[in-house]
Image: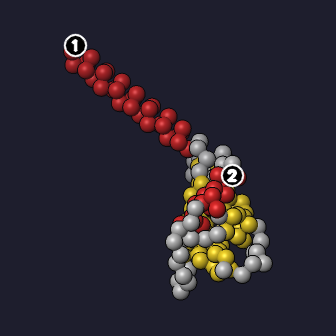
Amino acid sequence: MPVRHSRWSARLKYSLLAAGLCSALLALSGCATVDAQTTAYVGVEHPAPTLASQVEVLRREPDRPHIRLGEILVDASLDPAPPITDVEQKLREEGAKLGGNAVVVVYDHIQPVAAYVSGPRWNRDFQTVEGRKLKGIVIKYQ
Protein backbone atom coordinates (compact mmCIF):
# COMPACT_ATOMS: atom_id res chain seq x y z
CA MET A 1 0.00 0.00 0.00
CA PRO A 2 2.72 2.61 0.73
CA VAL A 3 4.23 2.04 -2.74
CA ARG A 4 1.01 3.16 -4.45
CA HIS A 5 0.79 6.28 -2.30
CA SER A 6 4.35 7.34 -3.21
CA ARG A 7 3.72 6.72 -6.94
CA TRP A 8 0.54 8.81 -6.77
CA SER A 9 2.39 11.52 -4.88
CA ALA A 10 5.21 11.58 -7.45
CA ARG A 11 2.73 11.79 -10.35
CA LEU A 12 0.91 14.63 -8.63
CA LYS A 13 4.17 16.53 -8.10
CA TYR A 14 5.18 16.11 -11.76
CA SER A 15 1.71 17.14 -12.94
CA LEU A 16 1.78 20.26 -10.78
CA LEU A 17 5.30 21.09 -11.95
CA ALA A 18 4.28 20.69 -15.60
CA ALA A 19 1.19 22.84 -15.08
CA GLY A 20 3.28 25.51 -13.37
CA LEU A 21 5.81 25.58 -16.20
CA CYS A 22 3.06 25.81 -18.83
CA SER A 23 1.33 28.67 -17.02
CA ALA A 24 4.66 30.51 -16.63
CA LEU A 25 5.38 30.15 -20.35
CA LEU A 26 1.89 31.40 -21.23
CA ALA A 27 2.28 34.38 -18.91
CA LEU A 28 5.63 35.28 -20.43
CA SER A 29 4.37 34.93 -23.99
CA GLY A 30 1.69 37.55 -23.30
CA CYS A 31 4.22 40.30 -22.59
CA ALA A 32 4.93 43.08 -25.08
CA THR A 33 8.54 43.04 -26.24
CA VAL A 34 10.92 45.58 -27.75
CA ASP A 35 14.32 44.24 -28.81
CA ALA A 36 17.09 46.22 -30.50
CA GLN A 37 20.32 45.50 -32.33
CA THR A 38 22.82 48.35 -32.75
CA THR A 39 25.62 48.50 -35.31
CA ALA A 40 28.29 51.20 -35.28
CA TYR A 41 29.60 52.24 -38.67
CA VAL A 42 33.24 51.55 -39.50
CA GLY A 43 35.47 54.52 -40.29
CA VAL A 44 33.57 57.19 -38.33
CA GLU A 45 34.34 58.75 -34.98
CA HIS A 46 33.17 56.91 -31.88
CA PRO A 47 32.20 59.63 -29.37
CA ALA A 48 31.52 59.00 -25.70
CA PRO A 49 28.01 57.82 -24.82
CA THR A 50 25.38 60.51 -24.27
CA LEU A 51 22.31 60.66 -22.05
CA ALA A 52 19.25 58.90 -23.45
CA SER A 53 17.04 61.78 -22.29
CA GLN A 54 18.96 64.13 -24.63
CA VAL A 55 18.59 61.98 -27.78
CA GLU A 56 15.87 63.10 -30.20
CA VAL A 57 13.74 60.72 -32.27
CA LEU A 58 13.13 62.22 -35.73
CA ARG A 59 11.07 61.13 -38.73
CA ARG A 60 13.16 62.99 -41.33
CA GLU A 61 16.80 63.93 -41.71
CA PRO A 62 17.57 67.29 -40.07
CA ASP A 63 18.92 70.29 -42.00
CA ARG A 64 21.74 70.79 -39.47
CA PRO A 65 25.16 69.41 -40.44
CA HIS A 66 25.69 65.97 -38.90
CA ILE A 67 27.56 62.71 -39.26
CA ARG A 68 26.10 59.21 -39.23
CA LEU A 69 27.40 57.01 -36.43
CA GLY A 70 25.49 53.76 -36.94
CA GLU A 71 22.09 52.17 -37.13
CA ILE A 72 19.53 50.55 -34.87
CA LEU A 73 17.17 47.72 -35.83
CA VAL A 74 14.17 47.38 -33.53
CA ASP A 75 11.82 44.39 -33.34
CA ALA A 76 8.57 45.00 -31.47
CA SER A 77 5.74 42.59 -30.81
CA LEU A 78 2.23 43.28 -32.07
CA ASP A 79 0.03 41.15 -29.86
CA PRO A 80 0.25 42.75 -27.38
CA ALA A 81 1.90 45.83 -28.85
CA PRO A 82 4.14 47.88 -26.56
CA PRO A 83 3.34 51.58 -26.13
CA ILE A 84 5.09 53.75 -28.75
CA THR A 85 6.85 55.53 -25.87
CA ASP A 86 8.64 52.24 -25.07
CA VAL A 87 9.78 51.89 -28.69
CA GLU A 88 11.03 55.49 -28.77
CA GLN A 89 12.79 55.02 -25.42
CA LYS A 90 14.61 51.96 -26.80
CA LEU A 91 15.74 54.06 -29.80
CA ARG A 92 16.99 56.79 -27.42
CA GLU A 93 18.87 54.31 -25.21
CA GLU A 94 20.58 52.59 -28.14
CA GLY A 95 21.38 55.93 -29.82
CA ALA A 96 22.92 57.22 -26.59
CA LYS A 97 25.24 54.19 -26.43
CA LEU A 98 26.76 55.26 -29.76
CA GLY A 99 27.12 58.88 -28.60
CA GLY A 100 24.38 60.25 -30.84
CA ASN A 101 22.28 63.39 -30.52
CA ALA A 102 19.36 62.01 -32.55
CA VAL A 103 17.96 58.89 -34.21
CA VAL A 104 16.31 59.33 -37.62
CA VAL A 105 13.67 56.64 -38.23
CA VAL A 106 13.97 55.60 -41.88
CA TYR A 107 11.88 52.41 -41.82
CA ASP A 108 8.79 51.58 -39.76
CA HIS A 109 6.63 48.69 -41.01
CA ILE A 110 4.57 45.77 -39.85
CA GLN A 111 5.65 42.61 -41.61
CA PRO A 112 5.72 38.82 -41.23
CA VAL A 113 8.53 37.76 -38.93
CA ALA A 114 7.75 34.04 -38.49
CA ALA A 115 5.35 31.30 -39.51
CA TYR A 116 4.06 28.04 -38.14
CA VAL A 117 2.09 25.06 -39.37
CA SER A 118 -0.50 23.26 -37.25
CA GLY A 119 -3.01 20.48 -37.71
CA PRO A 120 -2.91 16.96 -39.11
CA ARG A 121 -0.97 16.12 -42.25
CA TRP A 122 -4.10 16.05 -44.45
CA ASN A 123 -5.53 19.38 -43.23
CA ARG A 124 -2.70 21.67 -42.22
CA ASP A 125 -3.14 25.29 -41.30
CA PHE A 126 -0.39 27.81 -42.12
CA GLN A 127 -0.23 30.91 -39.90
CA THR A 128 2.13 33.88 -40.09
CA VAL A 129 3.30 35.89 -37.11
CA GLU A 130 3.65 39.61 -37.73
CA GLY A 131 5.93 42.04 -35.95
CA ARG A 132 6.88 45.68 -36.12
CA LYS A 133 10.30 46.45 -37.63
CA LEU A 134 12.00 49.82 -37.31
CA LYS A 135 15.35 51.05 -38.58
CA GLY A 136 16.93 54.21 -37.24
CA ILE A 137 20.15 56.00 -38.20
CA VAL A 138 22.09 57.42 -35.25
CA ILE A 139 23.48 60.89 -35.97
CA LYS A 140 25.69 63.40 -34.15
CA TYR A 141 25.38 67.10 -34.86
CA GLN A 142 28.56 68.93 -35.87
> As drawn, is 15 to the left or to the right of 79?
left
Name the residue located 64 percent from the left edge and 62 percent from the top edge.
Answer: 54
Q: CA distance from mark 1 to mark 2?
A: 62 Å
> As drawn, is 63 to the left or to the right of 121?
right
- Give the labeled residue for mark 2: 85
- Give the labeled residue for mark 1: 1
Quadrant housing the N terminus: top left
Name the residue located 68 percent from the left edge and 52 percent from the top edge.
Answer: 85
Mark 1 vs mark 2, foreground winner is 2
> As drawn, is 58 to the left or to the right of 18?
right
> Mark 1 or 2 closer to N-term?
1
Can you say whether 11 is above or below 131 in the image?
above
**Residue 115 seen in this snapshot:** no
How many numbered circles are shown? Answer: 2
In the image, residue 67 lies at what x, y percent? 65, 81
In the image, residue 112 lies at what x, y percent? 67, 61
**Label 2: few (<14), some (14–19) or many (≥20) C-alpha neighbours in 10 Å:** few
Residue 115 location, quadrant:
bottom right
Residue type at numbered disc 2 = Thr
Q: Secondary structure at mark 2?
A: helix
Please state which of residues 60 and 35 is positioned toward the viewer in this rendering.
60
